[in-house]
Amino acid sequence: MPSSDETETQKLAIYFDEAVRFFKSQSSPGECPMCKSVSWALPSEIEGSPLSLSDSGMRTLDDSPVLELKIICNVCGFLRAHRASFIREWLDKNPAGDEVTENV
């Protein structure tokens, strides 16, 4: 039986194309605050599988882990974190092919 942390990770699964759609619509990565590069990467291990989510070390009121999707600067390695549950909620409200709700 999966642990509650594993269940949370499965519930929040975010795929590469979904993350790209979210960032293009809601939160363009822009310049890296460290080196000013505009070249970012998403942590993808296997094509077609969910992106890697990181445990932030925080917990919700019901003791679930707060998971993050991190994007990585391709020049200096700076990590930028976004709360996975926020991205997943936006994706669920804005299915692919539908009109995108700006800045929800």
Image (spheres, helix red, strand yellow):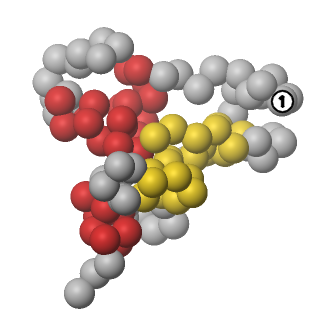
Q: Residue at x 23, y 87 (%)?
A: 1
Residue 80 in picture, x, y percent from top left? 64, 38
Residue 20's quadrant in the figure?
Answer: top left
Q: Is residue 44 among the parts visible in the rendering? A: no
Q: Residue furthest front?
A: 61
Vertical comparison of 75 with 62: above or below: above
Tell me if 66 is positioned left or right of 100 in this view: right
Residue at point 71%, 22% (across, down)? 31
**49 sits left or right of 32 in the view:** left
Q: Residue furthest top?
A: 102
- Amino acid type for the residue under numbered disc 1: Met
Q: Is residue 65 placed above or below 22 in the rendered structure?
A: below
Judging by the rendered image, the residue that carries numbered circle 1 is: 34
Image-quadrant location for residue 57: bottom right
Q: Position of residue 58 (x, y in %)?
A: 52, 52
The location of residue 18, given as percent across then percent down, is 33, 41
**SS at badge 1:** loop
Q: Position of residue 43 (x, y in %)?
A: 56, 55
Q: Is residue 72 visible?
A: yes
**Residue at position x 24%, y 16% in the image:** 101
Q: Nearer the viewer, residue 53 or 42?
A: 53
Q: Residues within 10 Å of mark 1 (few under 14, many from 20)?
A: few
The residue furthest bottom is 1
Left/right of residue 88 with respect to residue 74 in the rendered view: left
Q: Quadrant of the C terminus?
A: top left
